[in-house]
Structure formats: C-alpha cells, structure tokens
Amino acid sequence: MNKLQDELFAQKNTKALLKQAQQAAFDYIDSQSTQRVFPSETNLEKLTIFDESLPKATSDPSLILELLNTVGSVNTVAQTGGRYFGFVNGNALPITLATKWLSDVWDQNAALYVMSPIASKLESVCQNWLNQLFGLPEHTVAGFVSGTSIATLSGLAAARFRQLQKLGWDVNQQGLFGAPRIRLILGKQTHGTVAKAISLLGFGQASIEWVDCDNQGRLMVEKLPPLDQSCILVLQAGNVNSGAFDDFTQLCKLANRAHAWVHIDGAFGLWAKASNMFDKHTKGMELADSWSVDPHKTLNTPYDCGIVLCKDPLALTSALHQQGSYIQLSEQRDGLLYTPEMSKRARAIELWAAMKYLGRAGIAELVEQLHSHTQFFADLLTDNGFTILNDVVFNQVVLSCETEQLTKKTLSLVQQSGECWCGGSTWHEKSVIRISLCSWATTKQDVVRSVDVFVKARKQALQT
Ligand SMILES: *Cc1c(COP(=O)(O)O)cnc(C)c1O
C-alpha cells in the first residue's frame, strides 16, 4: 500500500479524530450561553491565520481540527442560541444534529436507490408526510435540494416545461429560441431568488410583469393582469420582510381558471400550514401547482435542506430529467429524478428526524411558539417607543426609530453588541430594522434581554 493510504487507514481505525471533533462540539455547546452572538473584532482578526498558500504535503489531521476549533468556533455566528434574529436563519433541533452526525459517517449519495436504499426510503416517507402536513394532492412529488433558491428554480423549470407544452412547444427538444412567449407574473415584493431563477431559465427579466403590492407586501388581486395558459404566477407564503401571505384562494382560482401555473415561494412561511392558528393566511395554498419550502428555516433542521413540491410529477421529472448509459433506475424512489443535481447528500434524513420527532402537533407548537414570541418582541418594542411597521402575522417584525438616521445607528450598535443580532432592510423606501424569530431556542427572557439591547443602543445613538 502507498503511504497516504496507510495514513488514512490509521486515522479511520483510531476514531480519535471523531472523538476530538466530538469534544470540540461539546465545548461549543457548553459555551453557547456565554458566547457572543457575532464575533468580536479581536477574534475576526485571527481569521487571517487561514491565509496561507496550498500546503506542500500532508500534515497532522489532529492539528487541522485543532486550528479549526480554536479559530473557527469563536468566529461563528451563534445562530443555534436564542438571540440571533438575522435573515430567516433557523436553528437545528438536537435530534436533527444527532442524525446528521450519524449519517455524515455513512456519507450517502441520494441520487439513486441503488446508491442508498435508506436515503431513498426516507425521501419517500418525507414526501408523504409533507403532503399530509401541507394538505397537498396525494400525487404531489418532492425533490430534496439545497434550499429554496434551487427549489424555486426546479418548480419554475417544471412550469416552463408544462406551459410551453400547452402551447405546442417541447422545450427539452426545441429550447427557448423561437419558443412561444411565456409571461411571468410576479408581485413587486417577490424574493430576489425568483428573478434569479427566471434568468437562469433563460426567460430574461423582460418576461416579467410586475404587479403592485399592498402595504404589507401582498400581491394586489385587483392589479393582476388577465391570465392565460402562457402565464406563470409566483406567489409568496411569507414576505421576507413582513411575513405576509398572498391571498392564495382568490389568486389561485383566477390562475387555475386560465390554465396558468402557480408557484408559491413558501421558504419559511409554508410551515404555518401546520397550525390552524394561521388558517386565515395559508388557506388556498394547496391550489397551486408547485411550492418551495425550507426545512433549514422554520423547521429548524441543519443547513442545506430545501424542498420543491410539485403536483405535476411528469412536468417536474421531464424538466429535470437526465440520461446516462450507466444510470440504473429502480422500482423504488430515485432522488435524482426530482432535482437538478445528480450526486447529493442524503438531506432528507434530518428532515425525517425532525418530522418524526415533532409530529404534526410538535410542528404546530413550534410555529405557534415562534409567532407568539415574535408578537411579544413587537409588543415590548412598542412599549419602549419603537415603531412597528408591519402586521405581525408570523415570525417577522419590521421596525424603525424616529428618524432613518437613528434607525441605522441603532441597528449598527445592536449588531456590535454581541448580545443579539438582527439585520436591516428597506421597507417602503425607508431603512428599517428587521427581526426574524426562527429558533426553537428563543425564550421570552431572550426577547426581554434583546429589547434591552435595542433600548440601550437607541439611547447611545441619540447621544452621539
Ligand atoms: C430564504 C428565502 C429564500 C431563499 O432560500 P434559500 O434557502 O436561502 O435558497 C427565498 N424566498 C424567501 C421568501 C426566503 O425567505
């Protein structure tokens, strides 16, 4: 055997590296309550240690882990704690971390049944459970992808295939040059990833017809242009700033009647369907043709876990199909049929673990808890003189101070505090502070402590 192989076998057999990683992970978990939410300047400066040229030869793996642990851990953002409110970044449920660890050791490729029977089985189970949870038609299929960006790309690829087929055009054969025109109907508050998917699919931004939204960011039904079978309408379950939901019942009915395709971007908001509490907002979402949703947000699975759902299986698999003399499809589920990628990690494992652990009631409780803590956050901020700019319908708060200048300064001081972290945004052409409460671990005390940070930050901003 050669030298490298000897070395690698030795590492695998001693298991010492995994133990070392485990110890480092345990230390990280123990330090969570005291760790800064965003790294300090001093720690950020240490990142330069990674600026080295490609190593000339192999080195001690234990030292590599040690380096990552000492300089890496302190330069993470503590989003697995309770006081991270940035973007819409979820936490990870303990069981999802544990199952991910175990399945990382398995290192499965979820492309084909013959590559991983367990991954194939759990993908099938998750697909059924998701259909039940979201109340979707039984034949709806799920593709497990890296996140909503790729889920939306996949859903719109299915839409492109089907709508062009209705117009007598086979996009797989004939491509887009000379194809009948497809009209993309989007609210002006649509998430940026949708426009990106549209570009990638070769439609061009000129194919988009932008529809006005109301003050919560919902597409205005009365502003919808007449639809026909050349249309793809994109709706939102959860506006990325306000959390608002489009009026699915009315919009989907109009679209269905016109044979237009409806895709719903429900990255974080689709999960609201799990609780009756949000019926008013989620009603009618089952009338769409395809959906994108992220377990790695609201459901609190680890990252790299998104789903495309499509009730037209043939459109999805036709859009994403690939062939190869060596590809061995089976009678069982072959994951690659439903995703743009071929090789991929078996991400449905953590999704399965989350749903198996929480069950329907647990998922409902999780989304209700996120909502009630968000409402509490908004109420406390109001009591302390901040202005809440949105209706808090789910887990998002948009707020401001008396002036834009003060809002920006306050936000910057909150971000530097290390006590909590949230981002900024633009809402109705004004700079705002944006809170997304997406972690199972956030408690009321975390909210109280974070509001204190906001109050102190504004006081300090007023003095400078
Ligand atoms: C996060 C988000 C996306 C993008 O999802 P990724 O998983 O980051 O690719 C799209 N739409 C909305 C509404 C989102 O919140």
Image (cartoon, rainbow, N blue to C red):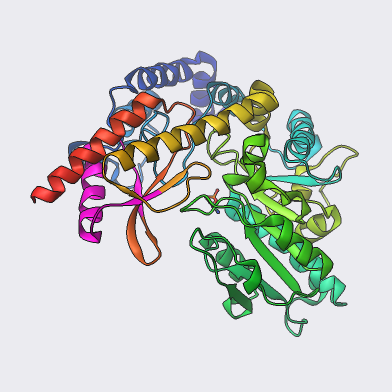
Q: Which residue lies furthest to the right in this view?
A: 331
Residue 421 lies in the magenta stretch: yes
Residue 185 sits in which quadrant? bottom right
User: Can residue 347 be seen at all in this image of the molecule?
Assistant: no
Q: Residue furthest left?
A: 463
Task: Classify 4 as above or below 311.
Answer: above
Residue 243 versus residue 5: which sits nearer the camera? 243
Residue 95 sits in which quadrant? top right
Q: Residue furthest bottom?
A: 178
User: Which residue is found at the position 52% from the left and 24% from the top?
Assistant: 6
User: Which residue is found at the position 83% from the left and 52% from the top?
Assistant: 313
Residue 223 versus residue 182: which sits nearer the camera? 223
Residue 38 location in percent, x, y? Answer: 29, 38
Is 315 left, or right, of 268 in this rendering? right
Residue 375 location in percent, x, y? Answer: 44, 37
Residue 433 location in percent, x, y? Answer: 33, 51
Residue 169 location in percent, x, y? Answer: 84, 76
Residue 274 sits in which quadrant? top right
The count of marks equals 0
Residue 422 lies in the magenta stretch: yes
Is 284 left, or right, of 11 in this rendering? right
User: Which residue is found at the position 62% from the left and 76% from the top?
Assistant: 209
Residue 58 versus residue 82: which sits nearer the camera? 82
User: Can residue 329 be seen at all in this image of the molecule?
Assistant: yes
- Which stretch appears magenta? 398-424
User: Which residue is found at the position 18% from the left and 38% from the top?
Assistant: 456
Quadrant location of the N terminus in the rendered image: top right
